[in-house]
Amino acid sequence: MEITQRTLAEAWQRTTARHPLLDGVELPPVALSDDELDEWVECAEETEEGGLFLLLDEDGTVHGRHGLYREAFAVRDLEQVLYLIAESAIRGRGGSLEEVADALERIDPVWGRRFRTGGLDGTGTVEACGRDPLEGLAWIAGSWREQDPYTTLAFFRAAPGRSIDAERLALLYGADPAQVAAGTRLRDLQAVDGGRAHWDRQWESCCFGQAGGWTFLLYHDTPPGSFADTEAYDALGVKESVWLTATSAKAIYSFAYMRDGRSVDDDGGMLELIWYERGRAPYLRGGELDFLNRALRRAELDHPELTSTFQLYFHALEESLGLRLPRGDFAEGEVRAAYWRPHP
């Protein structure tokens, strides 16, 4: 059945009549054009009212928006729309995410499971993680916000059954061939002149290696000539890549994911981590990055002790994509490292 303004209003009225927990919850404003929606959202932001707004397309697609620039969902299934409205309303009352999940479960067991899994279809595991969330990748989240140890954390993965040579990757980016050949470690760079020399040159260095099926390369700024040999880069067989970039002075922390030569972003442009708020999916529900929405919801429910959204986000990246960094190697200075090669 195609969704119309009338069918949506009647369905929401029936839903609130059946469930006391939704008593008094009004249907969010429904706009029929982008201009009308923008006008309502702007007025709401001026009065600091916020909340969920809906845009109904002629084909029956319902778009949910939080603020002027964040589309939360775009669905054509009436039951999913009703759930998303209820989720927003229950979450807006405050309380822990467990309390939100319990409330939705009392309304409808399917809705409770859907919230716990983070997906619109309600499928997926709901078992607790059972691991230390600050191992794997999330251990670096706190210092990374201050660009320590590096501004950019880049990860590369080949097709199943293949791997990307970390040394070749570092050399293509511009690592000093002599230091790569010598097997230089981070502790070797830090040992020179009691560490003072590395402090002065750390912006010219990189660390590299492999973990969790990914090849990683950490750096601040790349030297001139990086990627000059495109044929050699293509020969590495990169199928997926992830970049996490911190610019603390400007409070910009971005995430980029490439797969098979294209950006995976639901046409959302640059994806900033500051858009992520606990309990609210940062990416389009049901979109290409919905797997990360699901992983974030599980991280939130599994680890309420984590107060940092960056740690939760990094743990979700570990759970969904398998990204890891060897914490022990960094702590002991055993991770491979090099300065960029000298230029004439």
Image (cartoon, rainbow, N blue to C red):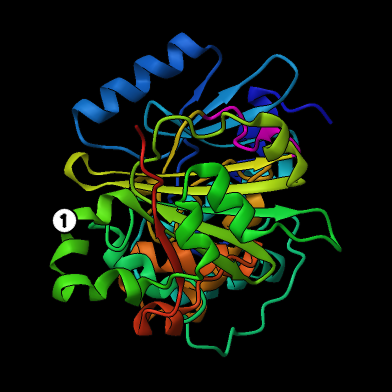
Locate residue 335 relative to residue 297 in the image: left or right. left
Location of residue 213 with respect to 301 vertically, above or below: above
Q: Is residue 164 magenta?
A: no
Q: Specify the segment rendered in magenta.
A: 260-268
Q: Residue 263 colored magenta? A: yes
> How far from the left and from the top, in percent, is residue 304?
40, 79
Query: In the figure, 301 relative to 4: above or below?
Result: below
User: Which of 10 and 168 lies nearest the eye of the viewer?
Assistant: 168
Q: Residue at x 51, y 43 (%)?
A: 173
User: Residue 326 at what x, y percent from top left?
Assistant: 50, 77
Q: Quadrant of the C terminus?
A: top left
Q: Is residue 204 visible?
A: yes
State the SS at label 1: helix
Three-letter code, disc 1: Asp
Q: For mark 1, what is the residue?
A: 200
Image quarter where the N terminus lies is: top right
Q: Is residue 91 left or right of residue 157?
A: left
- Identity of the residue drawn at 73% across and 62% down: 122
Where residue 197 sits, quadrant-wise, is bottom left
